[in-house]
Structure formats: structure tokens, C-alpha cells
Image (tube, coloured by chain):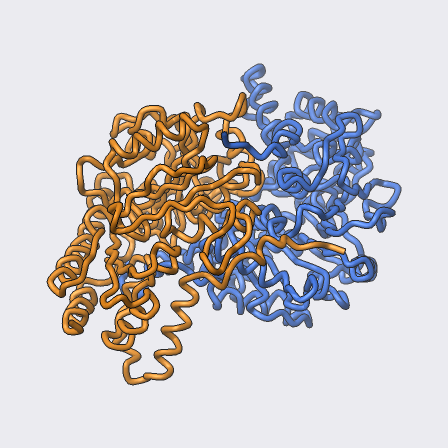
Chain colours: A blue, B orange
């Protein structure tokens, strides 16, 4: 008789955003007259259309697929060289970092990569995550059997090292007391919107090298960095090529959430004994994945053209203006809020000691604004709430006005 | 200190098609004058461009992504309903099979799905595979730790049940003597091109139900079926909804090898105790995957329109005409060959007791034709050789003429 992977049964409840969607649907059904007034600043999904340079490239790539002479079948295992070269040049060499093109693996997005990367590690590794955290890091480790058992009282898994990020430490994790084997870091951070200076990131790299740990560095929000002292890639830190894997995405810098493209960098210097993690990931990539679509890889390359860069930077400026409106509006209304400077997320403290979900219901009911409860990202997110700047300018302004009136 | 997944180190050598590519490159370098004469009937990659209906839909979907009002961000977890409905109607209801749309999961292709499906099963399951077999089934189980150790002498893994498919049994696997928990079946078969009648497939379903096994049924070549007694989906068999997962692809029926789209069907009746495999796969899909691109899902839906159907069926007819040329040409030349009737693959017996790789070298050198050594698909493939019908008509004709002259 076949047996299922029992680890799946250890996952508590359903995915955060499904729960939110259900709550909003129930509210709309109970309050049909408010149905059209609801503004979502909840899920981190973009709203601006793809940039003209990307659209033009998609059309030309589609035309190539229509003609025998230029039609493309299976893609090269690691991705097309035209895209990997553009990434190596623009995202690394231009920042003084040497990454070879065979250290770059094109994928269908950072969510897949951050989930699948666990495949190349033994189950017997102890992971450390920030708390609050992007749920995928923890959930995928639970599925793999690496997290231990769930304790509903603490809302924590027995074998995971949690690194609280709260107002007290400026939402920056501290080096853990217990020694982890794999450390997940995400800067600029989802959900808190916080970052740490490059000098602080160097301490994590030094720590990982000292302990023989691997850092899985999620830089999906790199394009939102506005401050000079923040690293755009972990490889700006000395020695990171020997201890870090970097995950990148086109979702937030170019609006590819529904277009799907990302990449993972694994330097060949990163080894376990004689085995490079690069070779293991190459084997996984070649065996369990068959490449991102050719037309989408062309679209990704268009992001790196001068027009693509100018257009996508305009989109980021649009979202960051929304972030400013939210941040300043919340401050004016007397909320304690952070983030929104190097990231599209604003992290606010709930008023009157409300729980995150109480504030969710309150905001939905009183202002018809949807956000994301901080507790959904981990126990240390309790009492916090995430708003995103991915809405339209008009909706963002309106949502902030409504929130101001609550006070 | 972090630990890698040691199971990866048990994988022998590199992926079959990488080895072939290297051999061909070396031959071209040593024989530069023959460089342009080489015809590949090796890898199962299509060569005809995407159908006009698919191209038109890709363009219109790209245009939707260019405008705020029709732009699409994150897709629904399981895939867009427009595509799942078309699949449920065309691939199942039209064949008298009831599959609900929430039993269909859209993905980026059957290779990913056939690799990832192992995630929802315990490591403690015994798998059974045909021999020869599509290498992904075995390799991904090795990576998961389910295959045991590799024995170079037998070229087999200690914990895998192999079901030989040879001339003696008409390339149809027999029910295994040892009891498996998970059975991989692929009909029409890659690499042999063989099928079994629906009445024989029913025996496998009955066997799985009796033993409490799951069948992972790869129907990627379904569109090539020409004989009436062959099932187009395993759910044509009674009880298959309680024991079978079906994998499907747009790669071979619509030329999506470089466009990437597939789907997996898991009926809700398929359970382990109270747990439906559908719910486990939904959780995996929602946690480790973020949907296929919107524009690609639209392209998939275009395949199901009357124009899309007519155009893709024309492509299949083109490839199957190639298959006929190869099959009949080989027979005329005195080869023993099968397949090519319900599948785009021809499976031939090497002459003069050559090994598969000897014949590969012989064919490359004497006829400048590239095929795939049968032994690359498993020890029972030794002494066989695969040719595909995915080349152009002209190349196929030329390749067959050259092979005829060898005799």
C-alpha cells in the first residue's frame, strides 16, 4: 500500500492569502453595497501593466515561434545565454561582482526556486528563519521533514530556529544562539520592508563562513533599494561566494508576477567537501525542470535594455511614491510604521493592542481596506500589519484618507 | 556544518541527451566537412512552428498584459478556469470521462510534474518502472532517496522494481512479481513507441486497486494514438479514479517544448486513508509553484478551439507521416523495428549484435544520422535504438535513404 508524505499533514491551516481571500469574499457577500469600495493593499501583487519594451519583445519573440526557421524547442538547461549574460553584466559586473554565466540558473520564479532549493540539501539540516517570515521558506521545509513538529501554543516548529524581528531590534535579526546549517535571509525584507546595511550583512556572511552554514538570500525586492549603504546583492560582501545562494525575481522589478521569471545564483566556490552546490542544482534543474518559456526569457532580456530599464524604473518610482503616501499618511494619523523606503512594504503596529487579525477585520469593516495580518507571517508578527504599495496611486491615496479618518 | 542531499551522488553519469550532444559536438570537430550533413532524429523535440491559432492568441494575450485594465498578476493556484474547463471538456468529457476542473492542475510541463509528484509520497514507497524508461522517473526517485543504491554491474537500483519491455513481450510490461507502491506507466510509450490495448490497461488498474498501489500515468503522447482499442486517458478504465494520477503535456500535441505547459489530473477519489492526494498536490502547487504564465495558459486554450484542433492535428499528421517513412524504410532495409503507429518514436533492433552505443557511433559515422541509444533508457534497452519522427519531412526522407544504403 502506498504511503503519503506525512510531513504535509504537519502544515497548520491553509496558505495565508487564501484565508484573506475567503474573509474578503465573506465580507462582500454580507455587505453587497460595499462590494465595489474595497481597496486591497494586501497581497504583494503588482498592478501596472508590463513595460512597452517588454511588450514589444514578447510580440517579436512570438513571431519567431511562428516560423520554422526561428522556432525554438527545448531551451538550454540553465536558460538562454542572452539572458544569463545580461544578468551577469547588469546585476553583478556593474556592481563590481564577478558572477559567471554558468553560475546563473533561469527559472519560472523565486517562489519555485525558494521552495525547490531544499531538494539539494539533506533532511538533516537545521534551518533558521526570521520571524515574521515569507511563509514559503518554512512551509517547504515542513514538507521536506526538516522542520520537526508544530506546537500550536508557540506557533513554532520544534526544529526551526526563529530569529525575531521586532520594533526592539529595528526589525533586524540577530545572530542566533543555536547554530543553524541553513539561514534564510530576505533583504529588503518581506514582510517588514526593513533592510540592514551592507556592514551588517557582512557579519552574517562571516558568521556563515565560521559556522559552515549556507545563506539562502532572497533579493526579490532589490530594485526598491534607495539607500546607498544597502547591498544590492549579497556577493558585495567578502566571502559570500563561499556561503551564499541568491534568489532573484522579475516579479517586483518588472511586474512579472503573472509572467513568471526568476533566477538563482550559485557560485562554484560554494562547496560541501568536494561537491559544488552548483553541480547539484544543475542536476536538479536538468532533471526536474525544462526551462522557462523562450518568449518569457526574451521578455526578461528586454528588461535589461536601456528602454526597459528606464520604463521599469518608472514603475518602481510609481510604487515607491505610493509607499511614501502610505508611510507619511500613517505617521500623520499617529500610527507607528516602518518600511517603505527600500521596499514596497509598510509595516505598521496595530493600535490599541489589537491583534493582527482584529485589526484586519477592523480595517476591512471601517475603512474597506484589505491588508495582511502580521501574525500570518509568524508569531513575532503579532500586533503588526502589512500594507503594500502595489495598488494604484488613486486607490492608495483613498485608502490612506480612509485610514486617517479612523483616528 | 550544512549537509547536502547525498542521494544526488548516487546518480550515475550525466543526463542521456547531454552525453549525446557532447558526442555529436566531438564528431563535428573531428569531421568539420560533415558538419552540415548531420541529421538529428535523436531528442524528442518538435520542429514545426506553433500553430497560427496559438500564435494569434499569444499576441492577443500579450496585448492584454500591456494595458492596466486587462493586465494579469498572479494566476489562480490551480490555473485559469478557462483552460481547465477546456481540458475537462475536450480531453475527458468528450471521451465519456468525468473530471472536475478542481481535479486538474495546470503546470509548466510534464517533466516538472513527473519529477515533482514524488514530493507528496513518503520516501518509504517502492516504485516500479518499465525498462527501458524515460530517465526522469528513475532519476527523481534516486534524488528523493527512494531508489536505493546503484549497482553498476546490473545498471539497476536496489530498491526499484524493473519491468522489462523487450521484443519477447511485445514491449508491454508484465505485472511485477514483487509488489510496488507506485507504478510509473507511459502509453504511448517513450522510448519504445509501444502501446497496450485498453483491456490490458484495465488489468493494471485492477492490479493497482488490489495492491493499494498508485499508478502515475504519463499520457504525454496521447495525441499520436491512431488505433481504436487504445485508451486516450487512463480514466477510461473502471476504478482508475481511485488509483491513478495522469500527466499530460502540450509539448508533443501542440509543439510547446519551448513554450512550456502541461497539467496533472488527480481525482478526489484517490485517497490514502482519509487524505486525498488532490489536497496534497494542491498544497504543493500553492506553496512551491506560482502558476504558468497567463499568456501561455491562453496559448494552451487556443489549442482547444476548432482552428487550434485542426492545425495541431495537421502537425501530428506531418510527424506521423515521417514515422511511416522511417518504419517502412527500416523494414525495407531489413531492420526489425516497432512503434511509430500510435507514437512518434520508432524502436529498432541494432543489427549484427551491435550494442546501442556501437550502433550510435556507426550511424553517426556512416550515415551522419543521430539517434538515441536504447541502453540510455535502461539495461533492457541494450541492443535497441530510438529514432524520432520530429524532424522535417525532407531530413527524415534523406536520413532513411542513407540508412538504407548501409545495408
User: From this viewpoint, is residue A198 visible?
Assistant: no
Closer-to-camera residue (A195/A236)? A236
| Quadrant assignment for the C terminus of chain B | bottom left
User: From this viewpoint, is residue B10 visible?
Assistant: yes
Residue A79, percent from left and from top? 48, 61
| Quadrant assignment for the N terminus of chain B | bottom right
Q: Tell me the quarter of the picture where residue A140 sits.
A: top right
Residue A387, percent from left and from top? 69, 37
Residue A400 drawn above or below residue A76: above
Residue B126, percent from left and from top? 50, 39
Q: Tell me the quarter of the picture where residue B299 sits.
A: top left
Residue at point 59% right, 27% down? Answer: A38
Residue at point 53% right, 22% down? Answer: B273
Residue B331 located left or right of residue A98 = left
Residue A288 drawn above or below residue A232: above
How many marks do you count on the picture? 0
Closer-to-camera residue (B4/B130)? B130
Residue B7, percent from left and from top? 59, 53
Residue at point 25% right, 49% down? Answer: B168
Residue at point 48% right, 68% down? Answer: A81
Residue B94 drawn above or below residue A249: above
Residue A60 located left or right of residue B139 = left
Question: Furthest-left residue in view?
Answer: B332
Amino acid at each position: 500500500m502506498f504511503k503519503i508524505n506525512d510531513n504535509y499533514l504537519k502544515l497548520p491551516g491553509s496558505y495565508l492569502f487564501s484565508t484573506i481571500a475567503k474573509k474578503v469574499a465573506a465580507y462582500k457577500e454580507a455587505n453587497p453595497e460595499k462590494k465595489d469600495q474595497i481597496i486591497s493593499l494586501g497581497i504583494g501583487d503588482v498592478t501596472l501593466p508590463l513595460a512597452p519594451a517588454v511588450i514589444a519583445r514578447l510580440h517579436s519573440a512570438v513571431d519567431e515561434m511562428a516560423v520554422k526557421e526561428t522556432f525554438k524547442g527545448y531551451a538550454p538547461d540553465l536558460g538562454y545565454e542572452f539572458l544569463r549574460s545580461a544578468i551577469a553584466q547588469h546585476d553583478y559586473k556593474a556592481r563590481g561582482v564577478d558572477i559567471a554565466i554558468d553560475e546563473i540558473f533561469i527559472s519560472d520564479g523565486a517562489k519555485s526556486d525558494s521552495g525547490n532549493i531544499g531538494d539539494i540539501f539533506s533532511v538533516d539540516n537545521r534551518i533558521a528563519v526570521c520571524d515574521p517570515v515569507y511563509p514559503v521558506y518554512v512551509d517547504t521545509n515542513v514538507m521536506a521533514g526538516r522542520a520537526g513538529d508544530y506546537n500550536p501554543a508557540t506557533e513554532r516548529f520544534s526544529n526551526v530556529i526563529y530569529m525575531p524581528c521586532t520594533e526592539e531590534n529595528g526589525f533586524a535579526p540577530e545572530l542566533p544562539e543555536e547554530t543553524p546549517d541553513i539561514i534564510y535571509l530576505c533583504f529588503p525584507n518581506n514582510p517588514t520592508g526593513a533592510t540592514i546595511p551592507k556592514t551588517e550583512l557582512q557579519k552574517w556572511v562571516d558568521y556563515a563562513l565560521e559556522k559552515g552554514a549556507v545563506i539562502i538570500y532572497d533579493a526579490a525586492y532589490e530594485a526598491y533599494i534607495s539607500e546607498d549603504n544597502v547591498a544590492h546583492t549579497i556577493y558585495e560582501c567578502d566571502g559570500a561566494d563561499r556561503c551564499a545562494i541568491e534568489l532573484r525575481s522579475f516579479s517586483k522589478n518588472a511586474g512579472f508576477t503573472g509572467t513568471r521569471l526568476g533566477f538563482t545564483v550559485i557560485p562554484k566556490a560554494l562547496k560541501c567537501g568536494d561537491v559544488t552546490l552548483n553541480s547539484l542544482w544543475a542536476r536538479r534543474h536538468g532533471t526536474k525542470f525544462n526551462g522557462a518559456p523562450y518568449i518569457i526569457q526574451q521578455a526578461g532580456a528586454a528588461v535589461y535594455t536601456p528602454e526597459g530599464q528606464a520604463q521599469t524604473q518608472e514603475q518602481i518610482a510609481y510604487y515607491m511614491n505610493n509607499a511614501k503616501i502610505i508611510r507619511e499618511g500613517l505617521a500623520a494619523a499617529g500610527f507607528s510604521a516602518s518600511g517603505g523606503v527600500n521596499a514596497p512594504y509598510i509595516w505598521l503596529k496595530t493600535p490599541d493592542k489589537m491583534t493582527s487579525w482584529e485589526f484586519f477585520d477592523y480595517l476591512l469593516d471601517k475603512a474597506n481596506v484589505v491588508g495582511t495580518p502580521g501574525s500570518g507571517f509568524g508569531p513575532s508578527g503579532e500586533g503588526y500589519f502589512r500594507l503594500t504599495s502595489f495598488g494604484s496611486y488613486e486607490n492608495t491615496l483613498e485608502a490612506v484618507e480612509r485610514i486617517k479618518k479612523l483616528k
